[in-house]
Image (cartoon, rainbow, N blue to C red):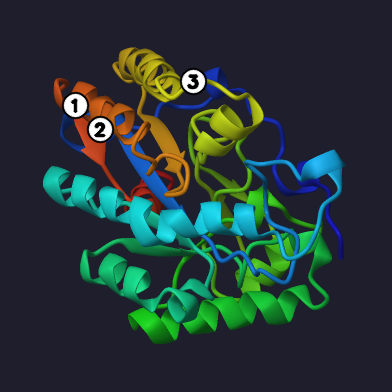
Amino acid sequence: MSLQPRDRAAYSAIVDRPPLRLPGDARIVVWSIVNLEVWDIAKPMARQVLPAPTGQVLLPDVPNWSWHEYGMRVGVWRFFKLYERLGIAPTLSINARVCQDYERVARQAHEAGWEFMGHSWEQGPIHKEADQRAMIHRSMDALERFTGTRPVGWLGPGLTQTLETPELLAEAGVRYIGDWVYDDEPTTIHTEKGPLVTLPYTVELNDIPMMLVQHHESDYLLRRAIDQFDRLYEEGAERAKIMSIAIHPYISGQPHRIKYLERFYEHVAKHSGVLHWNGVQLLDWYKGQSQ
């Protein structure tokens, strides 16, 4: 059965709901998500920083593949250093193939206690999968073998889904998704295989649209992140707020951008009542609130 989004979740105005509360009188949760991907050199790249001459996409696309590869060889290690210093274990949105192609990176994240969230087998739209169900199970199974724990979260590449995806995810053991960026709070949506929780992932505080689509200067991430945090922190006095920030090592891990990510966390650290949670912690808290 193919259900429309409105069949899964009725419209709900945030002002009509009872406010959610965080423990210890906290105001806001900062949910940090690092995205790790595999770009197959035999296929068109997920995105381009350098357009092909005359606009003709040619394979192999060595310059754009190499640009992404920089993130896995260099940029991601700046993330590891930052989050180790801060004592934060973010959520890792990870193509399962990373555990094969970049085992060193995946192992570092696992040893650091990062939460692994399913993110397809390799980077590419869900709509192009010949067997979506098989890909989801393959990805979840591979992450479970690598970490010893089956992931409970999922983010589609580019947030892509078909109308059947929620059922397939629930069937594979997924309990929360990040693809539905329609609220400041978690919500529960219906599937024929059981409920799924939506967590407030972001396309606004995401370095792909900000840097590669909108082409902002490097410091714009800091400006927007601070503006987002300050308003949600203010509103958090009345009801719990969740602020997500999504980063990629080939973008925010670049030398000219990393300091602005670091400064954002410095700004956050000046405030009390802030929690740094991963997706599992958010899910468990929300399920406790709704019981």
Whole-number angstrom distance, CA of label 3 to CA of label 1:
20 Å
216 or 245, which is in the foreground? 216
Q: Is residue 5 visible?
A: yes
CA separation in Å, label 2 and label 3 = 16 Å
Please name whichever residue, 32 or 100, is drawn nearer the observer in this view of the structure. 100
Circles 1 and 2 in contact, beta carbons < 8 Å: yes
Q: Which residue is mark 3?
A: 217
Q: Secondary structure at mark 3?
A: loop
The amino acid on which the numbered mark 2 sits, given as a three-letter code, is Glu
Quarter that holds the N terminus: bottom right
In x, y percent, where is residue 226?
A: 35, 18
Q: Which residue position holds label 1?
A: 266
Q: What residue is rendered at 67% in x and 45% in y?
A: 48
Q: Earlier in the sequence, mark 2 or mark 3?
A: 3
Quadrant of residue 108 within the rendered picture: bottom left
Q: Amino acid at mark 3?
A: Glu
Kindly identify which numbered label has been placed on residue 262: 2
48 horizontally vs 54: left or right: left
SS state under label 2: helix
Q: Give the number of the mark in front: 1 or 2.
A: 2
